Image: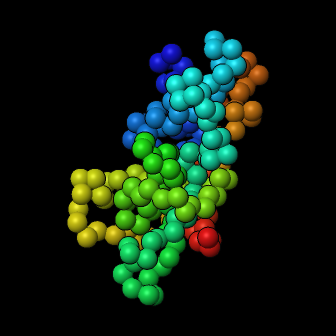
Amino acid sequence: MNGVVLRSVRALLVTSGLPTKLWGEAFKFVVTIRNFSPSKAIEGSTPYELFGGRKPDVPGLRVRGCAAAYFVLKQRRKGKQDTTVKEALFRGYPKSTTGYRVLDLVTGHIVVSRDVRFREQWTVAADYVDQLFETFYPKKSGVVLHVSIPYAKLPLHDYSSSCSSDGTALALHSFDEVGPMDAKV
C-alpha cells in the first residue's frame, strides 16, 4: 500500500510541477483521494464510507497545486482600501473543519478558508514556491516578496506524449511562465 501511495505522491508532484518540499502535504492529499475512491476489496464502497457511515462529498474535490484566490475576512483586513481577495496555491483540505487549505503567495502563510475560487488549469512556478519557502521558513518577520507571481498551465507534464516508442519516459518539458492571474472572486 505504501508503494502505491508514494508512486501517486511522486506523480502528483511531477504533474503539478511543485517542489518536493511539499511531499508531506501531497501524501495527505493522496490518502484523502484514495479514501474517497471506490475499492473492489470492499465491494465498490469507499474507505471513507465504511469509516464514517456516509458517502464522501466529492464535488468539493479540487486539483491539488492549482492556483486559487481566497476571500480575506473583514476582521483580517487593515482598512477599507485593503484588498478583499488574495492569490494562493491550493494545498489540500483541513483536518477538522470544512473548507480548503491554501498557501498565501505573498505572505507564505497557510490559510484555511471556505471562500475560495479555483483556477484548476493553472499552477505557480516551482521556483517561486521554493523562493517563498526559503524566505519564510525559518520565519523571517516582516519579509514580503515583491515580485510578480509566475503562473503555468496544468498539467506541466503530459504522460500521453512523454513515452518513447519503447515505453520509457522522456524528459520533462519546461513550462512557459505567464502573468499574474485575474483576482476576481
- Report x, y in % for residue 127: 45, 53
Quadrant for residue 49, please give it: top right
Is 142 drawn above or below residue 58 in the view shown? below
Quadrant occupied by the C terminus:
bottom right
| Left or right for 86, reference 158 | left
Residue at image position (36%, 81%) is 78
Residue at image position (45%, 71%) is 73
How is the rendered protein coloured? Answer: rainbow
Is 129 drawn above or below residue 59 in the view shown? below
Quadrant for residue 64, please give it: top right
- Report x, y in % for residue 101: 46, 51
Residue that protrudes farthest toward the front in the picture: 53
Residue at image position (45%, 48%) is 97
**Closer to the camera in the image, 184 or 163:** 184
- Report x, y in % for residue 24: 40, 36
User: In this view of the protein, can residue 103 be seen by the observer?
Assistant: no
| Left or right for 85, reference 37 | left
**Closer to the camera in the image, 51 or 26:** 51
Residue at image position (63%, 41%) is 57
User: In this view of the protein, can residue 6 be seen by the observer?
Assistant: yes
**Closer to the camera in the image, 87 or 132:** 87
